[in-house]
Image (cartoon, coloured by chain):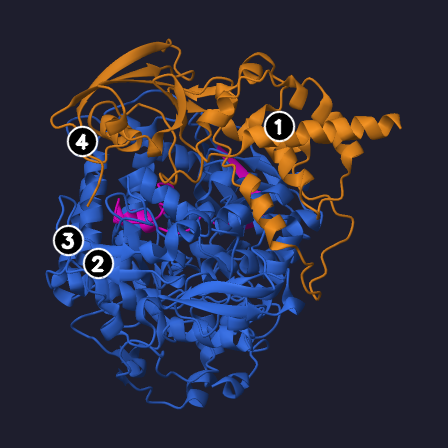
Chain colours: A blue, B orange
Amino acid sequence: MSGALVSTDVLVIGGGLAGERCAIEAAAAGHDVLILSLVPPRRSHSCAAQGGMQASLANCVKADGDNPTLHFLDTVRGSDWGADQEVARIFAEEAQIAVRELAHFGVPWTRVRGGKNSYFIKGERVEIEESIENDGLIMHRDFGGTAKWRACYAAAGTGHAVLYAVDSEVIRLGVTVRDRTEAVELIHDGSRCWGAVARCLRTGEHYPILAKATVIATGGYGRIYGQFTTNATINEGMGAAIALNTGVVPLGNMEAVQFHPTGLIPSGILLTEGCRGDGGYLLNRDLHRFMVELEPHKQELASRDVVSRHMAQQMRDGKGVETPYGPHLWLDIRHLGEEHVTTKLREVFDITRDFVGLHPAHDLIPVRPTQHYSMGGVRVNKDGEAYNLAGLFAAGEAACWDMHGFNRLGGNSLAETIVAGRIVGRSVVSHAEGFSLDAKTGLAFEANRHAESRAEEWLGRSGDGPNVFELRDAMATTMMDKVGIFRTGEELREGVDELHTLLGECDRAVLRSKVPGMNPELTFALRLKNMLRLALVTAEGALARTESRGAHYRTDYPLRNDAEWLNRTLVRWPVDAPEPNYSYEPVGLIDLPPGHRGYGSDERIELTVSVDDYNGDVDEKQREHGKLDTVEPIGTRIQWGAWEQAV
Amino acid sequence: MTARTTQAGRRLRFEIFRYNPEDPESAPHMQTFELDETPYMSIFIALNEIREKQDPSLQYDFACRSAICGSCGMMVNGRPSLGCRTLTSDLPDVIKLHPLPVFKLIGDLSVDTGTWFREMVEKTEGWIHAQEAFDPDAQEARMDDDTAAAIYENDRCIECGCCVASCGAANVNEEFLGPAGLNRIARFAMDPRDERDDADWFEVVSSQDGVFGCIGLMACHDICPKELPLLEVYGYLRRKALSSAMSRRS
């Protein structure tokens, strides 16, 4: 079942926005580009980003005075200082260009309507006069955790509109896409990556692809939480897994997992932050608006981790509505009115009507926090190149670049896909020049045989071992119950033990079906061990991190601890080793000193060294952990002290 | 909560089309599965239940499971539908599932919409045609918000293929652009950023494979899961084709 060798200049694994934007850059520079995608690219999970894309264009009244520095500040504060601040700065600067470029690609951004407009702000209807001068520029809306209205949006389908525009550009450039294809193993020699082994999801056939540069852009790993996630069924984290399986590439901050406040009961489908941005309320069982007293300033618009935790606490305190699917709370957008709900929040209207049979202008919507976003991923330098493995890159949610630290702000992920796609695309272009692939065919076929043997091994097992789908469900329950919104050492230890047991069970699991072709059960079985490995490093990372930071909340260590934990977790799993290795690197150069986020608790354990001392050996320490050379040296993009004028 | 009610204790009978082209021993046939209905059960929930508990070889496609990615178009009791948002509570006790026609079969309920839609985009050149290169230092070009909203309205197509499967013309004429293709043309034709003029559109719109290939059954308009205004789209394109033909004459 082995196919012929394919070779290309640039191999992009993942056909979502980050991968496609990267492919555009490389194809426009004249390189041969091949995209592999589990699904036709327009069906990627990027399409689900309903709410918006952050960029500080400052086009409407409530965005007046906004600029990249404020965007940078919000991003770093949102990250709870876990972000690489240079990357956050690069991002905030280039997000503006990214949004405008998308207008050029055809995104129908919602525009400023000069004159009198009526908005909902913190639940009140407010009349605002937009300047005629700005009429027709890209409009902004409010989103959680930002100082200004900054999210650019295309009605309620931003991700869809952006994905279609970007994919149109990919097709215009004639980029080859192999959909229904999965990258199952990286081809590498321990210091350089030379492509990947692909498995065709039409036929089940494996074949090697040699590439001068390889990009992982496979999105997040939310499905390690099973059905307790807003993520699509395809977000199983296989890009991060194949990087981890090299034994040399570290994953960063895998314990940094974001939960979204408003997953729809019972399916977990995301209801956009725009619901709250536009003035929606959260209510408990008694129809009490609890966020008003818990977060008087930001109310429902505090950052996601803060809102999710308050919601989880309400449910723990018995203030949730009990149902056969567990407790939930209510989202109330009735006061926004029929017209607003059916136009500006149309996707929300469609989802509630179609999946729970409710009308959001008349009914309360049942919601609960669910896993939403993976801040962790393949650790890369500021050019997007993986630690320890030249020629391998990562972009978007699959990467730990790392602009989100321990918490991502709403609308920053969509912006990251395009900004990182552009930047990684440029890195890939310079990398794809001047390498010969001729000598690497042996390596490619060896990796291909290795991947094939895994499938053969599964097909060869017999007897009455466990069922792969039951193991997946057990993993999901462990992750949600023991590695969820509230974390304690005791529960995390139990979670780690359970995941170890499941890894053992996975080696005994048996397929029920051995049909030829792609065989859906085999396809999932091949991913299961990878998912369990990702789950284990997430749980162990969370157990080791004895502090609370961003979305990582330890009830037994409730304070952020900058004295000991102002760092990034790196995990490598050497080939054939029984256990992964954990190490810690500095978060990056610090421009904005650690402080209060502006919401949540402002108690914390302070940094014991000066910022200058912290910054002194960042580069050296990161290099020790495998960081490769960047085009520009570290720190060149930081605008030192620019934030001081903004606070 | 005014949630949909489920008829208590219903035992559902699923009759599902089966064929695995990769298996020389497989031949097209219908296979029956039975399931107890649960609240909020959708075709997504039901098929997963069948695959995981009864027959793990069953092939079908879901990704977002929230009716935005367009992966799960299939025939549900003869009607092209998105499986993820079709609730069993809206269906009778016997539920027949077939793959969408027109598209190439991959296996069981799974069809190759990806290749079809890529070819459609290539044929219609479904991208913005603009001479000027992007200037990263310039402010964005202005657009009236009503225009943006109108483009968005047509841009909402999720390429699920339900309209194509329901289309009398697409089922007999392989070259027909189909409702989704015509909608795609309208989306770009109304976009002021696209510099193609009526004459550029004329060839692709006005042939038997374009808007005049439509035989007027309008099933597409009735079944579109995104409720796209396809009737208006054809009106718009026919008017465009006519005005272009008139101006050619004069």
Q: Amino acid at mark 2?
A: Val
Q: Which mark is residue A321?
A: 3
Circle 3: element type: loop
Q: Compared to A493, does A271 lie above or below?
A: above
Query: Which quarter of the picture shows residue A305?
Result: bottom left
Q: Which dot, 1 or 2, sits closer to the camera?
A: 1
Report the residue at 56% width, 28% height from top: B231
Marks 3/2: CA distance?
23 Å
Q: Is residue A638 above or below residue A278?
A: below
| Residue highlighted by disc 2 | A483
Discs 3, 2: same chain: yes
- Disc 1 versus disc 2: distance between alpha carbons? 53 Å
Is A333 on the left or on the right of A68, as rendered?
left
Q: Is residue A216 magenta?
A: yes
Q: Which residues are magenta?
A: A207-236
Instruction: Answer whether residue A391 is visible to the viewer in this image.
Output: yes
Q: CA distance from mark 2 to mark 4?
A: 34 Å
Q: Residue at x 15, y 67 (%)?
A: A489
In the rendering, which numbered label is found on residue B6? 4
Whole-number angstrom distance, CA of label 4 to CA of label 3: 20 Å
Q: Which residue is depicted at the point 22% across and 58% down?
A: A484
- Residues packed near mark 1 inside 10 Å, few (<14), some (14 to 19) or many (20 plus): many
Q: Mark 4 belongs to which amino acid?
A: Thr
**Are labels 1 and 2 on one chain?**
no
